[in-house]
Structures are given as C-alpha cells and as structure tokens.
Image (cartoon, grey):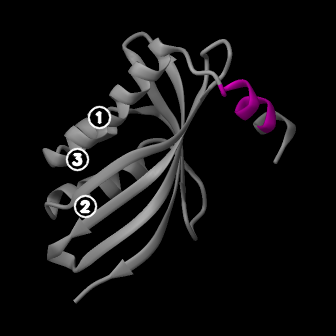
Amino acid sequence: MTTTAAVLLSAGVAVADDATTSLNAVNNQFNAFAADHDAAGLVSLYSEDTLWIEQGKPVRQGLEGPRELFEFVTANKGDVTHTIDHLYVSDDETLAVMIGFVEAKIETVGMDATGTYLFVLRPEDDGWEIVTDMWHQHALGGN
C-alpha cells in the first residue's frame, strides 16, 4: 500500500454522519438506476474524467467504459445490486473510498456473477461523484 492510500484509509476511520448519509445515497441511487434499467442515470453518477479499471483490460479515462457496460446491462434487462462493505472518508471530506459487493444477473446472456468494486468519489455541488471505478468479477455462470 502506498503512503497516500495508507493515509486515506487511516484518516477515514471516523466518517461524519452527513458524508455517510450522502455516500449511502449514491449507492442507493446506483441501485435504483440499475433496477430501472436506466443506463443514462447510472452514467450520470460518474465524473466526465472517470478512471475505469476493468480486470484484464487497460485503464480508460472518461465515460466510455461505464456507458458501454451499463448500456449492455440495461438493454439486456440485467439485475445489478451493489452493497457497501467499507466506507472511508478523508478528514476534510474531499475524497471518499467505497468498497463493496456486486451481484449481476443477465438471464438473456446466461450471466450470473458476483464481484467486488472500489469507487473513489469526490464531492460536487449536487453530491458525490464517482471519479474512479475499479471492479473485479468473481465468478461467471451460465446455461
């Protein structure tokens, strides 16, 4: 772990109630957009310059990665749900890290997968936005 990451994680042990509430709201909104099969809504949670880190692929910057994935998932009526397992917020509340579990099922393509995600978020005028999304799929099942 780099020094920067260690400082962030140790600084985030005590999360302020306002930050916790608003970060949980981001996760709830993600789940609501996913349940509504709203790709544009999901993409709206991301910064224009998001770092998209997908297993086995080069890192991409921008909204192309999230847009491609969410348009595929929503077009195929996929069911995706995020939970929050760990939440860290810097002492000055200018950066947050959210780590959790994801379940993704897309019956039309025979996908039944679980995974983990790590979001780095920063506050904006209308709430937190995702500036980094790193995810890993644990298992892929199918027919």
| Residue 110 falls left or right of residue 65 | left
- Kind of residue at badge 1: Asn
Q: Secondary structure at mark 3?
A: helix
Q: Secondary structure at mark 2?
A: helix
Residue 119 in picture, x, y percent from top left: 52, 41
Kindly identify which residue carries mark 3: 34
What's the magenta bit mostly, secondary-structure-wise?
A: helix
Query: Which stretch did the figure color magenta?
Result: 6-13
Residue 10 in picture, x, y percent from top left: 75, 31
Of the image marks 1 and 2, the number of the one nearer the N terminus: 1
Separation (CA) of disc 2 from disc 3: 12 Å
Quarter placement of the C terminus: bottom left
Of the image marks 2 and 3, the number of the one nearer the N terminus: 3
Q: Nearer the viewer, residue 1 or 47?
A: 1
Residue that appears at 44% across and 54% down: 101
Kindly identify which residue carries mark 2: 72
| Residue 123 falls left or right of residue 108 | right
Kindly identify which residue carries mark 1: 28
Residue that appears at 45% across and 63% down: 115
Separation (CA) of disc 3 from disc 1: 10 Å
Q: Residues within 10 Å of mark 3 (few under 14, many from 20)?
A: many
Residue 69 in picture, x, y percent from top left: 34, 57
Residue that appears at 63% across and 21% down: 14
